[in-house]
Image (tube, rainbow, N blue to C red):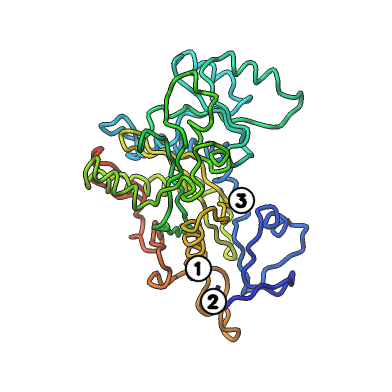
Amino acid sequence: MNGWQKTTSSSDWNIFWASIHTVSRLFHPDSGFRFKDSQIVNHFPTHSELTRKDLMVKNISRLKRELKKEDSALLHKGPDGYSALDFLPESFLLPADYSLFVEEYKRRPNAVWIMKPTGKAQGRGIFIINKLSQVKRWASSRVVGSKDAYLACRYIDNPLLVGGKKFDLRLYVAVTSYKPLRAYIYQQGFCRFCTIRYTPAASDLDNMLVHLTNVAIQKHGSEYNSQNGGKWSIENLKLFVESSYGRAKADQMFSDIQSVIIHSLKAVQPVMVSDRHCFECYGYDLLIDDTLKPWLVEVNASPSLSASTLADRLLKTQLMEDLFHLVVPPDLMDPSTRTVGVNQSPDLEKCGDFVTLIDETKLEKGEKVVRERSARGSRLIWK
């Protein structure tokens, strides 16, 4: 990228694009490492509060409990039966919440559940169940003393389909501070498609090519298109929704998506260590159902930057270019005036497709939420 050089020095650097494990070691009290005023790193030390599936669920549940005590309008149900914070499918941590899961299963015996290991990615270890006996078999087959936990999530069985196929969205969100919260969303993203037409039939529950959109899984299917990587641009999705449902509903869907992201960031804000030397670019994965309601699937701390197609390469190269413009203070390039930490007031005209999602420094004093007119009814959202 323009103006930057790769270095092998362990101490003389400005931006360290590191793994989550390396960042964890840097912030460990025994590491002895101290950031210079001109150094920033690409992860927050407590990022797992958002990016580990079980911790994300825990933090959002905690926020709901706190707001319930205040009778917050954020929890008031709209005409569709959901509140602004109902964007995660019902979830249970197993084996810890096994008894609660059994109760819920008995209450809704026809529901389908997707089992996800809390510490894995790219679809590894995921399976789908519709019988309690399947969970019992899983529990009995676990190695005694195993610390591997699973999250049992209600499976969204009414996904929005394009050409009869299921898809999810990958969006990029950059956070430069949690206290105050400053977050920016990238206007370019993509949809990832399954290669086989969707069917909710029980006989197809074991076919991950029908249910999981991960490229790591889909690329092994015989119908996988290596030219487009089974992907669609966000712009194509918007055009599809506009043509099928109208522009107003398409605009509302994308507004709802932004609300989901803001709520998730607010949920983890109290437990995040917001170090001034940190920023993070998350990969948000969302699913849209056939009512155009967005559901949060997971948040990735290290979204893949590898490219499987030319369009992929162009998008991710530009993403990194724009991200560096967003997070690097202008004075960092001048050794005589280097400043502390991540850019606190980026010039968005130079940041390409990044736009402000939320900036708490620009809110009115004491303002926490604003009322938004929605196709789903009037509601309050964080702003």
Distance, label 1 to label 3, CA atoms, is 25 Å
- Identify residue for label 3: 46
Location of residue 157 with respect to 184 vertically, above or below: above
Q: Amino acid at mark 2?
A: Asn
Q: Do residues under tags 1 and 3 come within 8 Å of each other at their CB atoms?
A: no
Q: Residue at x 63, y 71 (%)?
A: 39
Q: Residue at x 23, y 40 (%)?
A: 245
**Closer to us: 179 or 278:** 278
Q: Is residue 179 at least partly visible in the picture?
A: no
Q: Is residue 312 at least partly visible in the picture?
A: yes
Q: Quarter holding the N terminus?
A: bottom right
- Point out the frontmost of discs 2 and 3: 2
Distance, label 2 to label 3, CA atoms, is 31 Å
> Which quarter of the picture shows residue 148?
top right
Mark 3 element type: loop
Q: Position of residue 66 (x, y in %)?
A: 45, 38
Q: Position of residue 353 (x, y in %)?
A: 40, 63
Q: Position of residue 336 (x, y in %)?
A: 59, 86
Location of residue 85 with respect to 43 vertically, above or below: above
> Which quarter of the picture shows residue 110?
top left
Q: Earlier in the sequence, mark 2 or mark 3?
A: 2
**Closer to us: 246 or 371:** 246
- Identify residue for label 1: 321
Q: Earlier in the sequence, mark 1 or mark 3?
A: 3
Q: Do residues under tags 2 and 3 come within 8 Å of each other at their CB atoms?
A: no
Q: Residue at x 22, y 46 (%)?
A: 248
**Closer to us: 258 or 235:** 235
Q: Do residues under tags 2 and 1 come within 8 Å of each other at their CB atoms?
A: yes
Residue 2's tag is 2
Q: Amino acid at mark 3?
A: Thr
